[in-house]
Structures are given as structure tokens and as C-alpha cells.
Image (spheres, rainbow, N blue to C red):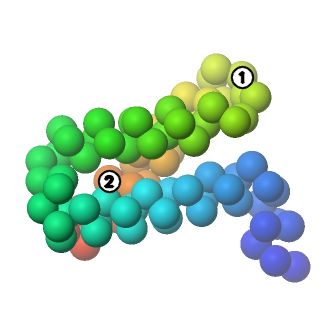
Amino acid sequence: MRLQEYCGRTEFSILQFTIKVTDDIKEKMVQKKLLHKVDIVQYIHQQMDHFFQKFNLKPALLQTYKNEVLNSVMFKLKVSKF
């Protein structure tokens, strides 16, 4: 059984998005385009707003997903860079 089959399409695409955003932010930090935590959080929110537009989710579930993505990305960045 593959990961996509185990967790479902929605959760798998959110997981891929989280990894993509984290890698993108790391690259932007190396290029000195994102330096401050406030800028990084704002960038994550912009990317999440764009990404989650394609999903038809209840507001509570949408907010839960967004919180989890933000927490996951920030945790990965703290471990690697901050």
C-alpha cells in the first residue's frame, strides 16, 4: 500500500504542499529573499490561501489543515535554520 492510498488524496496533496513550501522557503532564505519570521509566516499564509482554494472544505476543517501546515513548516524550519 502506498502512502497516497493510505492517507487519501486530500491529505496526501496537503503533505506534498507542506514539503514543497518548506523547500521553497529554505531556498528563499538562502537567497536572502525571506529573512524575518514575520515575512516567512506571511509567505506561508499567502501560499496556503492559494493552495486551499481548490478544496471544498468546511471552515473548521480548513482552519485545522492550515494550522497544521503552518506548524509543520515552522517546525521544519526551526530544526534546520532558525
- Residue drawn at x 40%, y 36% is 46
Mark 2 crowdedness (10 Å alpha carbons): few <14, some 14-19, many ≥20: some
Q: How many marks?
A: 2
What amino acid is labelled 1 in the image? Answer: Lys
Amino acid on which disc 2 is placed: Met
Earlier in the chain: of badge 2 and badge 1, it is 1
Q: Quadrant of the C terminus?
A: bottom left
Residue receiving disc 1: 58
Q: Say which element carries label 1.
A: loop
* Above-or-below relation of 60 to 4: above
Front-most of 47 and 75?
A: 47
Residue at 81% across / 56% down in the picture?
8
Callout 1 environment at 10 Å: few (<14), some (14 to 19), or many (20+)?
Answer: few
Does residue 75 appear in this view? no
Q: Residue 80, how many percent across, how many down?
A: 25, 72
Query: In the image, what residue occupies the spot 53% across and 36% down?
Result: 50
Q: Residue at x 60, y 59 (%)?
A: 15
Q: Position of residue 10 (x, y in %)?
A: 74, 49
The extreme top residue here reads: 59
Q: Is residue 17 above or below residue 76?
A: above
**In this image, 48 relative to 56: left or right?**
left
| Residue highlighted by disc 2 | 74
**Does residue 42 appear in the picture of this structure?**
yes
